[in-house]
Amino acid sequence: MKSLAIVFPGQGCQFVGMGTDLCSRFYHARERLEQADDILGLKLSQLCSEGPEDILNDTANTQPAIYVTTMILWEALAERMNGARGLIAFGAGHSLGEYAALTAAGALDFEQGLRLVRERGLAMAEAGDCAPGRMAAIIGLSDEVVHEIIAQVQGEKLNVWVANYNSPGQVVIAGCNEGLVRAVELAQERKAKRAIPLAVSVACHTPLMGAAAERLGAALAETDIRRPWVPIVSNATARPLSEPEEIRKALLRQLSSPVRWVESVQTMTRAGVTTMIEVGPKSVVTGLIRRITREVDVLNVTDEASLLGVAEALAEAAPA
């Protein structure tokens, strides 16, 4: 374990009951959830532990719920890293996870990050009301073929774009309802292994999120972003960022531009990262990373058992 990257998942890793085992074991977990309840004026702790699922899956609630649970896991891991902390070379997060990465690296404090992801979720939900959209995962086609499908659909005057470059052979597209139906139809004709509509009511990472930019931009402008202690690889640029103003611009751009996850992972491996640790309620990006490269070991921290296992592995790898 020569060089580490800590990575954080985004939406899709939430579930009713997340964080419950941590709250029963760690005082700081209960404290963080109570703090989040107070900050938001929302019973987030109850929503995480009891649901209901449809309310938890509302993007305005999902985003802070994932953020808080992720930060509880990260803080518990960070306390146990000791000398291995010095091995961390990069942080990164998939979409929403970028806010957790920035908080873990000290660019944001917990409350700042929480308020931002709540604003982001509300802004995206409002934008979805103004410009309804959907998302779909296209599996088993090359990026080039997906681009050809999108060009054909756009040529038919329907809005659809690439939203996520997740891994080789897995691209998420997003756009208006009619555009998604047509793109999925064409993907099936081109022999995609699967073309799966996602349970998302907004077209994330596309120009349809433009209406969210003003609200999120205002929140970002009021937030004191600090220089992180480790560079954060941006979704929007696939480059490591450390300057606060660059980070601010990249977070705003992320709303309406694709998540460049493949390139982000490649950026970290080219820089010498040998191990990536995914920290979040459910393992999501671990599988993507393994499809992108076989050159790194991937560990994940999703609950108490995995947390203690990874902490033990880090203790053994830490410089004497």
Image (tube, rainbow, N blue to C red):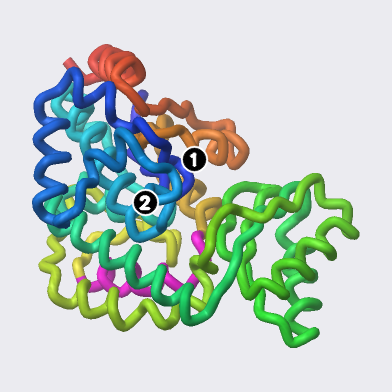
Q: For residue 269: magenta? A: no
Q: For residue 248: magenta? A: yes
Residue depicted at 20% across the width and 56% down the height: 113
Answer whether residue 133 is visible to the viewer in this image: yes
The earlier-in-sequence mark between 2 and 1 is: 2
Q: CA distance from mark 2 to mark 1?
A: 17 Å
Answer whether residue 4 is visible to the viewer in this image: no
Residue 133 at what x, y percent from top left? 58, 71
Which residues are drawn in magenta? Answer: 245-259
Q: Tell whether 125 sits left or right of 150.
A: left
Q: Tell whether 241 sits left or right of 115.
A: right
Residue linked to disc 2:
62
Residue linked to disc 1:
285
Q: Disc 1 marks which amino acid?
A: Val
In the image, residue 13 above or below residue 78 = below
Q: Tell whether 218 sits left or right of 18.
A: left
Quadrant of the rendered image containing residue 99? bottom left
Quadrant of the rendered image containing residue 214? bottom left
Residue depicted at 56% across the width and 35% down the height: 287
In the image, residue 276 above or below residue 260 = above
* Mark identifier at residue 166: none
Q: Tell whether 67 sits left or right of 298.
A: left
Residue 89 at what x, y percent from top left? 29, 41
Residue depicted at 67% across the width and 48% down the height: 168
Quadrant of the rendered image containing residue 156? bottom right
Crowding at label 2, few (<14), some or many (≥20) Cα neighbours within 10 Å? many
Helix, strand or loop under label 1: helix
Residue depicted at 37% across the width and 43% down the height: 8
Residue 301 at what x, y percent from top left? 35, 27
